[in-house]
Image (cartoon, rainbow, N blue to C red):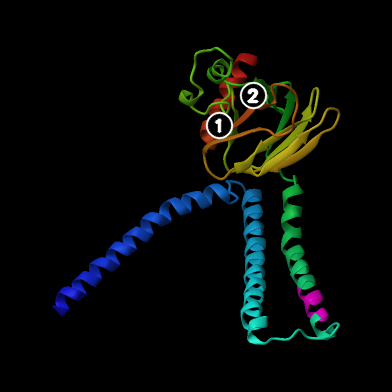
């Protein structure tokens, strides 16, 4: 009988473990959807690390504050005979709750300043791309490479978005997030971008690259990114720019350098 009890307990523990692991999978997926993504550029990793640092500091502070609050409410409630104190202030308490937040803010500034400097440092870039926003498309010009083209919403999405088209948007892959010609860049290359607009304000936003900058007519914003791994990364215009604002997506295709060189040569050939 003891053997059967132990066996039953072991099976029960295994079942509970399997249940917890099964529940952890959707929880982890949901957390990935809620939390800031890590991204594929140095700037995105800096932003993620700073975000998590600040999040954990706030979490620890919140846990401590609520723990003290709950302890005080439970242990010093009126039903247990607790009597409110009569003091007006405590110099020591005021020094502590002024000094600790100041030290935390100084620490966060110390960690943030180098990342902010790196994000704005466009020196030693290996390629420059001029990005111009239009109502409602993007133009990409590879400076010094004699390559320039417009990138607009893919025809499949453009057809499905029309009223009475008969197309089911749920059946369109990457609906409203696909273009006819993506921006193609090499991986492992520091790319400087010059961002402007030909009409109203737009914003070039690709979350995986940690890039979100305004495109303003008559003004040039600049920045840089280096993509670490090949892939397709999608974004959208993030500045309300007119009736078709929701229909000017951004697609960045990162290729290994050899493949990018071949693509660039194929784009230059017709121009030549």
Q: Position of residue 237 (x, y in %)?
A: 69, 31
Q: Which mark is residue 260?
A: 1
- Give the quarter of the figure containing the C terminus: top right
Label 1 crowd (10 A; few <14 / some 14-19 / many >=20): some
Q: Which residues are magenta?
A: 94-100
Give the side of residue 56 with respect to residue 2, left or right. right
Residues 49 and 93: in front is 93
Please tell me whether the stretch drawn in magenta is mainly helix, strand or loop: helix
Evaluate whether residue 272 shows in this view: no
Indicate the quadrant where residue 220 lies.
top right
Q: Residue at point 15% right, 77% down? A: 3
Q: Nearer the viewer, mark 1 or mark 2?
A: 2
What is the crowding at mark 2: few (fewer than 14 residues within 10 Å), some, or many (at least 20)?
Answer: many
The image position of residue 66, as x and y in percent, is 64, 71
Per the image, label 2 sits on a secondary structure element best described as helix
Numbered disc total: 2
Q: 152 or 260: which is nearer to us?
A: 152
Task: Give me the residue at 79% from left, 37% from top.
Answer: 221
Q: In the displayed structure, would residue 1 be above or below residue 50?
A: below
Residue 42 visible somewhere in the drawing: yes
Residue picked out by circle 2: 247
Residue at 55% across, 31% down = 260
Q: CA distance from mark 1 to mark 2?
A: 27 Å
Split into 4 quadrants, where in the image is the N terminus?
bottom left
| Residue shown at the point (76%, 54%) measured from the top left | 117
Furthest-left residue in this view: 1
Q: Secondary structure at mark 1?
A: helix
- Image coordinates of residue 118 in percent, x first then y, are 72, 52
């Amino acid at each position: 009988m003891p053997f059967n009890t132990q066996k039953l307990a072991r099976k029960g523990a295994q079942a509970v473990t399997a249940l917890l692991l099964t529940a952890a999978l959707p929880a982890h997926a949901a957390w990935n959807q809620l939390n800031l993504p890590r991204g594929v550029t140095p700037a995105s990793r800096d932003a993620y690390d700073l975000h998590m640092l600040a999040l954990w500091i706030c979490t620890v502070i919140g846990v401590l504050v609520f723990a003290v609050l709950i302890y005080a409410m439970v242990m010093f409630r009126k039903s247990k005979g607790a009597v409110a104190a009569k003091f007006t202030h405590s110099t020591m308490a005021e020094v502590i709750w002024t000094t600790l937040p100041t030290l935390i803010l100084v620490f966060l500034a110390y960690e943030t300043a180098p990342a902010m400097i790196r994000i704005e440092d466009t020196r030693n870039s290996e390629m420059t791309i001029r990005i111009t926003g239009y109502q409602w498309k993007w133009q990409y010009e590879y400076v010094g490479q004699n390559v320039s083209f417009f990138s607009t919403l893919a025809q499949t999405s453009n057809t499905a978005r029309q009223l009475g088209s008969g197309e089911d948007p749920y059946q369109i892959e990457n609906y409203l997030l696909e273009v006819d010609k993506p921006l193609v860049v090499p991986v492992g290359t520091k790319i400087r971008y010059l961002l402007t607009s030909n009409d109203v304000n737009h914003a070039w936003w690709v979350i995986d690259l940690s890039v979100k900058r305004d495109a303003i007519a008559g003004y040039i914003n600049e920045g840089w990114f280096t993509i670490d791994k090949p892939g397709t990364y999608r974004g959208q215009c993030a500045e309300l720019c007119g009736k078709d604002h929701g229909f000017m997506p951004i697609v960045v295709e990162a290729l290994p350098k050899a493949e990018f060189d071949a693509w660039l040569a194929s784009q230059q050939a017709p121009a030549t």
